[in-house]
Image (tube, rainbow, N blue to C red):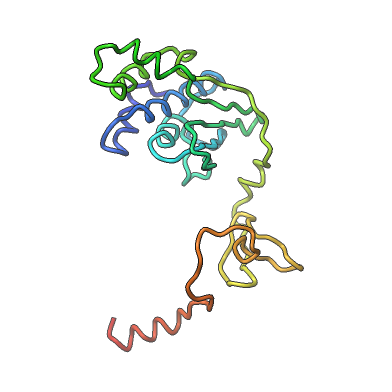
Amino acid sequence: MLDLQDLLIKTAALHDHLCPRQVLGVRTGLLAARLFEFDLPQSGRRLFAFVETDGCYSDGVSVSTGCWLGHRTLRLVDYGKVACTLVDTHTGKALRIIPHPGARATALLRARDAADAWHAQLEAYQTMPDDELLHAQPVQLTVSLQSIISRPGLRVQCATCGEEIMNEREVLCDGQALCRRCAGMDSYYCAEAEAPLDLQGVRASRREIGE
């Protein structure tokens, strides 16, 4: 297990600076290692993390736990909260870790000589005891972690848009596999043209203009 300063150096390198939320993320991972009683950051996929905000905090969590979006051991549930639920996939044990409600006030008391509240938090969050900085609560998932993780190599083609769907994210409608957008469930974009992209036509046009 890496120590706090080693982990802070690693997360600061991702942002070219260190901020209080990165410290909170790293300390979250260190507390998780103690409570789950195994070494972190992990090299495998035993621990799965749900982070409730993106940005600096989530990178701190990733660096200290080894849970990464690219490894499919981390999922963003965008509640806009500095909070993280960590799950031991071997036992099903789940812990939600949040900053202690009084952490900011305690930081001001512990770093009285800091230039401002931000610097007080940056300094104090590195040395405050776990019970003054963080709060951990056992929780039960209301989602299927097995469904989220899925199985490797599974892919189907959406019957409407023709795009590939991985990790069992398709929706069955009248016996056809559809992506969530085509099934009308949720979409973060609106296409200007619904016609499928003619890739062969695009390549032919580029050849004609010499690209």
Q: Residue furthest right?
A: 174
In the image, residue 32 sits, relative to residue 62, either above or below, namely above
**Which residue is drawn at the image coordinates 48% and 81% (left, top)?**
198
Q: How many marks?
A: 0
Task: Indicate the quadrant where residue 6 lies.
Answer: top left
Q: Residue furthest bottom?
A: 208
Residue 165 appears at what percent x and percent y? Answer: 59, 62
Viewer-closest of 113 and 58: 113
Q: Quadrant of the N terminus?
A: top left
Task: Indicate the quadrant where residue 172 lies.
Answer: bottom right
Viewer-closest of 61 and 181: 181
Residue 208 appears at what percent x and percent y? Answer: 32, 89
Q: Quadrant of the C terminus?
A: bottom left
In the image, residue 168 sits, relative to residue 64, either above or below, namely below
**Which residue is drawn at the image coordinates 25% and 17% (left, top)?**
114
**Which residue is drawn at the image coordinates 39% and 82% (left, top)?**
203
Residue 160 appears at what percent x and percent y? Answer: 62, 72
Residue 76 appears at what percent x and percent y? Answer: 51, 42
